[in-house]
Amino acid sequence: MKSAVTVLRELIDYFYLVRRLSLYELKSKNKSNYLGMTWEFLNPMIQILIYWFVFGSIRHRADIEVVPGYEVHFIYWLLGGFILWTFFYQSTIQGSKSIYTRLRMLSRMNFPMSVIPAIAIFSQFYTHVILLGVTFVIFQLGGFYVSVYFLQVIYFVFASFCLVFAISLITSTLSTIIRDVHMFLNATLRMLLYLSPVLWQFSILEEPLPTILKLNPLYYLIEGYRSALFGTEWYLLVHWQYSLYFWGIVITLFLIGANIHVKFRRHFIDYL
């Protein structure tokens, strides 16, 4: 618990630095491209079109039933989940290697290493906000007009950040000690895409498989995003048991991550 309080205090105290460095990192990564930061949201949109072409057009995918009696076209259903997946995947990957790729810089600077994963996550967060805005416009043009349910997007964005940061505390520490962890994580996340409700619905399976797959906290976030965008329900309240389960997972991962991070970070420079 003491380690968790330490990490939270460091994140709050250096939040201004996190925002400044994450924006600088995002700009510097794209400064040599003619289209600049446009690629940050152009790449995900291309991926969405590819998945729509493969899973929607070629297979003539029928409309998706979001809630009983309410069906939507597959492209909108896909878009509602894929923008969250893109943020989760990119943030987790960048967060896992955030410390060992910056060890030389960290050896010459004086600020806590716990903020480094947050910098990597925030650099992806800006892209996510832009994608969310583009998605919002597309939904308006498609007839899915904004409703009061859209306000819960703010909650699910925050919940996504908390989950990714908790995971990144663990993986960034382990990846610094054992570099293979990052490669294993990358392979695992690629598999996780097909074990999450991004490209297909769990309802086509028979019990107990849907219940088992719903143990994945990504299910909560993705379905929450879709509930907000399609304006179907207050997902976090209607499924309050799942909300408690999700935050239980996040808090547990954060406590574990904070503990091992504080325990090993004084030795990180030794891995240069």
Image (spheres, rainbow, N blue to C red):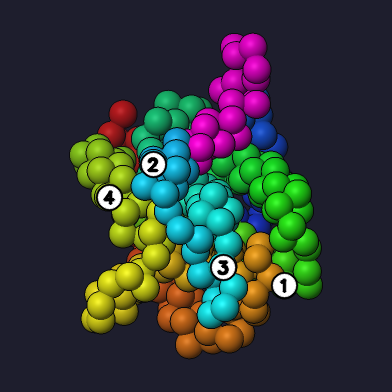
Other-residue count near label 3 (Cα within 10 Å), few / some / many at <14 / 14–19 / ≥20: few
Residue drawn 31% across the image and 59% down it: 195
- The residue nearer to you, when weighing 188 against 68, is 68
Which residue is disc 1 drawn over? 149
Mark 1 lies on a secondary structure that is helix
Q: Quadrant of the N terminus?
A: bottom left
In the drawing, what numbered circle is on residue 213?
none
17 displayed left or right of 189: right
Which residue is disc 2 drawn over? 58
Q: What amino acid type should be assigned to the residue bearing mark 2? A: Ile
The boundaries of the magenta stretch are 28-49
Quote the CA–CA distance across marks 4 and 2. Answer: 22 Å
118 displayed left or right of 137: left
- Examine the rendering and report whether any part of residue 81 can be seen: no
Which residue is disc 4 drawn over? 191
Quote the CA–CA distance across marks 3 and 1. Answer: 18 Å
Q: What amino acid type should be assigned to the residue bearing mark 1? A: Tyr
In the drawing, what numbered circle is on residue 71?
3
